[in-house]
Amino acid sequence: MFIGELEKRRDFTNVVLRADYVVAGGGLTGVCSAIAAAREGLKTVLVQDRPVLGGNASSEVRLWALGATSHMGNNNRWSREGGIIDEILVENTFRNKEGNPVLFDMVLIDKVLAEKNITLLLNTVLYRAEKSDDRTITSITAINAQNGTEYHISGRYFADCTGDGTLGYLTGASYRLGAEDKDEYGELFAPDKKQYGELLGHSILFYMKDAGKPVKFIAPDFALKDAEKHIPKLQNPEYFNPGQQGCKYWWLEYGGRLDTVKDTEAIKYELWKVVYGVWDYIKNSGKFPQAENLTLEWAGLFPGKRESRRFKGLYTIIQQDIIEQRSHYDAVAYGGWAIDLHPSDGVYAPGRACNQWHSKGVYQIPYRCYVTPDLDNLFIGGRIMSSSHVANGSTRVMCTAALGGEAIGRAAAICIADGISPAELASPENIIKLQSRLVANGNFIPGVSGSETAVVKNLVEDAAICVSSELELGCLPHDGTWFSLEYPAAQLIPVHDKVPVITLDAEADEDTELVMQLRSSSKRENYTPDITDAGLRFPLKKGPNHIIADFGKTYDSPRYVFICFMTNPKVRIPMSGRIVTGITTVYNHINPAVSNFGRQTPPEGIGVESFEFWCPKRSPENRNIAMSFAPAIRCFGAENIRNSCWRPFVSANAWVPSPKDMAPAVLLKWNRKQKIRSVRLFFDTDADHAMETVQMGHHDSIMPCCYRKYRIIDSEGKQLFAVSDNHQTVNLLLLDSPVATDSLTIELVRPEGDVCPGLMGIIAG
């Protein structure tokens, strides 16, 4: 029997969905936004036009997700993004430390499907939006050709996280495509529109593998012929060698002279032409015999985008906000990636493939950048947020964008609860609610303290705190390894007043001199050692030497300082394998991948500062410098448990027990019984580690200073919680029913190895 053979017209199945919050776009911004809203109790629909989540970080594009850490190649110490994106990065490192992009797809899907308040629609394309009036969106319509279904989705609040601003475009929000002139915002780095161009292009990446036997490649007819003649960077070893793959070919970029929305398909075909032309060059030019056994394993089927529409917000972040690290009363996120602009001619442009200029530290992003003045129930998230073209060179990167995604997801919940619009939430009296909620969920907002914005009471504030021990850091013991001062090294330590006297041994190949410097940052919240506060010179004899360094310097407020050992290849200093929360070593070395050549030296007149880079090495290479401190460093006490930074910032901000304490424990004691419904513990998962999502592997699946095992008991000795397999930064522990108790004891099991782990804070409520 034939079905409906006489019907004149057929329609797709129609499904009607109603939600509190509708998120268009399933990149990392949309994922974090949807999860945040769902955890706040909102019925959420996440609409994604691709078969997987993650956008540019997914297996379809395979770009690693990064943000303020910039491959650990800038001066932004302990700057990995917090909150939900941190949870995702830590989970991916735990499950997928090798950086398999297919497994990262799995991590994201797993996170979203775990939220009962999220309805996930994959392969579903938004193509229409309805409004009840000029300022209010009522619904969107999207279609899934895979299952023959059209979805009509109504919502109270909407978020455009599509990357191209599809929802904002359809609903009439104001946007810009292209760069501003220098005089519009006074941005000195604004590009010459004719010579450099106005837009960043798209890129397609590719993977190769060794087949173990010769593999031939016959290029398609559409492939670029004589690629080396058309692509100058194929002759530049900074950009090209035949063994690299994946993100190393980010500079295969095109489309900045076109409309990066409407011309995306044309850009894709040109990039395919480039990719297969480059592969033909590698395989068939005869210049690379080492490529004989290589085969093309994967090439992207569509490009990763950098820039298209940017929407008008209540505030537009600009170059000066980034470079000057301006303060904003409504800061809800932060950035730290370089201002990263690319020539619009992309792969065909001569010279550098990008111009990256860093600020001296992280910068705040105001909530107003995520709110359009044109609509009363639309948030704008991700790279389409309100920024100038220049500032977008930094704010566009995925982990930075994801922070904004979480912020607007939690903002939607406050708007619904309080019956206010996104613009009304931006008022000084309202914004503290959002800031407080973000901090309580593990986010770090530089310059914003959770105690300053606290809306929900943390019972720990009223508790007496007793701990089993406190670290007094008197030494970093020598592990038998040495570092030759081929380039400068520095021990980064927190001080609260007088700098301790430093003692250490050094070895010299001949009679020579060791130069030590004490450096600090002009802004104490930064980790750029741009001020030399003191210097010492020590004559060395050939062989072992004992150094006693007293800089005689006292600071009037807590900060990090750099104990610097300047270049002398004839000298070796001892290293320590002991890992301590809030302590690290940095080096004035180079990382060309992020335009770090030891020192940033911008041209005159572009509004960017000159300074040195002092950066750590990646695990397991990064050791501390073995030295002793007199007096011992005492900033790891119990009071840090009330802290709300959840990471080192100005100080270590952690309770760290003595290394001899084999049973570390915290006792919270109240004068009367409290009703405890939940406990949040904040652990050290090394916020200095970039945790790139794909391609780049990681040494550890669990960060060394993270407590894996612990239990919590009440005043009667009843065990409330027991955890034996933690690897996450934030542990939210919920009781089925409140417990009345006048004390909580947290008993922790030390991680293995020579580590001094920190507990970054506790919230009880």
Image (cartoon, rainbow, N blue to C red):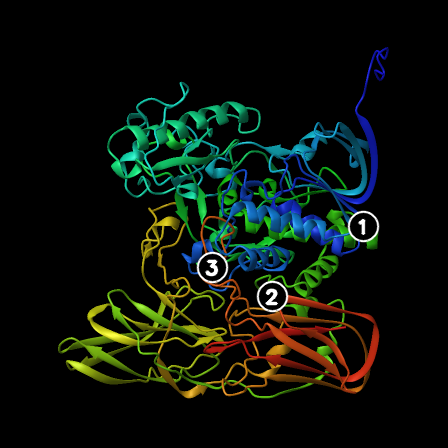
- Quick one: label 2 or label 1, which is nearer the N terminus? 1
- Cα separation, mark 3 vs mark 1, equals 34 Å
Q: Is residue 86 left or right of residue 21?
A: left
Q: Is residue 220 above or below residue 337?
A: above
Q: Is residue 382 above or below residue 633?
A: above
Instruction: Name the foreground residue: 271 vs 632.
Output: 271
Q: Please report the residue visible at 33 percent of the width from the left and 42 percent of the height from the top.
A: 243
Name the disc covering residue 420, or none.
1
| Pointer 1 local density, CA inside 10 Å: few below 14, some 14–19, many at least 20 | some
Query: Residue 653: horizontal and vertical position, in percent?
Result: 56, 74
- Quick one: label 2 or label 3, which is nearer the N terminus? 3
Q: Is residue 728 left or right of residue 158?
A: left
Image quarter of residue 530: bottom left
The residue that mark 3 highlights is 361
Secondary element at tag 1? loop
Position of the N terminus, as image quadrant, is top right
Secondary element at tag 3? loop
Circle 2: residue type: Thr
| Pointer 2 local density, CA inside 10 Å: few below 14, some 14–19, many at least 20 | many
Image quarter of residue 463: bottom right
Image quarter of residue 348: top left
Query: Residue 183: horizontal and vertical position, in percent?
Result: 48, 38
